[in-house]
Amino acid sequence: MKYTLESKKKYLLRIIIPAYSRFNVYSFVTNKTTTLGPLYIAVSAQEVKGWDVEVIDENNFRNPHLRNFSGNINHELLQKQKPADVVGFYGGLTCSLPRIYELTKFYKQRGVITIAGGQHFVDETIPEALFSGIDCIVRGEGEMSIRELLCAFSEGGDLSSIPGIAFRKEDKIIYTTQRIPIQNLDDLPLPDFSLLKYARIKLFPVGRVRGCKMNCEFCTVKGKPRYASSQKLIRQVDKLVKTMGAREFFIIDDLFGQDRDETLKLCKMLAEYQTSRGVALRFTVQIRLDKAKDEELLTAMRQANIKVVSIGFESPIDEELKAMNKSLRSRDMLELTRVFHRFGFFIHGMFIFGYPTKEKLNFRMRVEERIKYFRNFIKKAKIDTIQVLLPIPLPGTELRARLLSNSRVYPRSVLGWEYYDGTFPLFKPDYPLTPEGMQSAIRKIMGHFYHIRYLFIFLLNLISIISLPFYFNRIRVGWKKWCRRSRNYVFRIIGQRIVRSWTVQLYKEFFFEKLQKAKQLLTS
């Protein structure tokens, strides 16, 4: 199969990170950051002779002159201003698939070649994507595949000779041989944030590790972890500090500390870097709760100015943790959380409500009791910020396979991919739960945590600063406690607005009417 472009001096590859289908709990964060994967693809593609590359993040787009009346990006104007020859779509989030298909139709009508890649595209979903107009799907990592694809498009090469892709030939789907994952991540060029157009980044993503060994049932990130060196991540940070004025970073590794010795080395190098440059940086990492047992690691993290730890608590209910393939139990969680607090970390807790347990456990719990479990745990653990979502039967996960085998996933003809963002019930839950009760539960938990009352508590906390002198020789301790409270109250006020906006959006879309139809179709 061949796709051949007209001969010209320069071609343009436009990589698009598609907008979420609606406002959701991620919207606040995505407005100040971006996704790192497409930037790796972009900088690899830029090395191909005769090609220019740009990245458009629709969730972080700051050019009002390139938006239409509905507020969406005006791709027609964008294409007139700078015509793309090939458009690549980032399919890392399942809920963005309808937007990808919408843009695919737009660009195909203008004769543009379309490609896509990301975690969403697995054996189950590739046929749908190819029959929806996408010309080629990259399976797995795309840094090498994108270079070979662009050469094939500009030189008339045969796609069937490129490993790690899938494409449509008439009514048949062709899968080429699997591409071997990149083993030496140090060989990859550093991401180039200057390729990201019309965005404003405050929280810069950087990464060192690909893969995760924990094998959670609901997660798509699997496989033996592969590591870049600490020096590579330091170079990423240094480049962003010098060229973008970066001060705040999110280390996107799925599990910080998997490679313990190298992680300790990295923390030491980050601390030395900040001292030698005279800059104070802030880092957020994703880490397992049981890393609290490694006090040497926690000490090194604090010295490196890692301020926030995002921890997947998932659930305070043991039966649900067992179904997820989690090794921790709820009785240990509170004590481990206290260790992170003792070291001075801000804790962002991530939870999944109503996780479907396995039939042999014969577990039953009413929604009101579950809500009480979650609220009590969050209060006792003194978690600084929270995120409570519903289980998502994502393509390629063991969870989806288990639920499909029991005919529990609601039909996508009613509840399509756009609802796969963790805020909607997508399967028949365990008895005695109902999908409506699950949906209401996460709003109650987050609505209780993020509440307008914290505006008044915040104002009282401002007044309380006059009590600091009474700490005498412990004024530094008092100041830290005051700052922590103030920071958390501000986040709870912002969170209240997010939860309210999300709730309004929910009722505007008549979701519960669609849910009733999906339930009827599932049982018919």
Image (cartoon, rainbow, N blue to C red):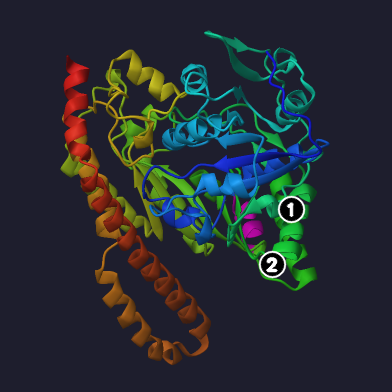
Q: Tell me if residue 276 can be seen.
A: yes
Task: Give the residue displayed 55% in from the left and 46% down from the top.
Answer: 291
Label 1 sits on residue: 236
Q: Nearer the viewer, mark 1 or mark 2?
A: 2
> Given contact means CB atoms under 8 Å apart, are the residues at marks 1 and 2 in contact?
no
Q: Does the magenta stretch include residue 155?
A: no
Point out the tag, 1 or 2, that comes first from the N-terminus. Answer: 1
From what the image shows, is residue 40 above or below residue 193?
above
Q: In which quarter of the image is residue 185?
A: top right
Q: In this view, does 494 lie above or below 297?
A: below
Q: How far apart are marks 1 and 2 (CA)?
A: 13 Å
Q: Which residue is drawn at 76% across and 59% down?
A: 238
Q: Is the magenta stretch mostly helix, strand or loop?
A: helix
Residue 367 x/y as whole percent: 18, 40
Q: Give the range drawn in magenta.
A: 293-302
Decide which of 298, 229 is in the foreground and name it: 229
Q: Is mark 1 on a helix, strand or loop?
A: helix
Q: Residue furthest right?
A: 49
Of the pair 1 and 161, the residue shown nearer to us: 1
* Classed neighbour count for the residue bearing mark 2: other residues with Cα under 10 Å, few (<14), some (14–19), many (≥20): few
Report the residue marked by disc 2: 245
Instruction: Give the percent coordinates (x, y) of residue 455.
Output: 30, 74
On the picture, is 198 further left or further right than 416? right
- Amino acid carrying label 1: it is Gln
Q: Nearer the viewer, residue 410 or 290?
A: 410
Q: Taking the image as drawn, is residue 431 in sight?
A: no
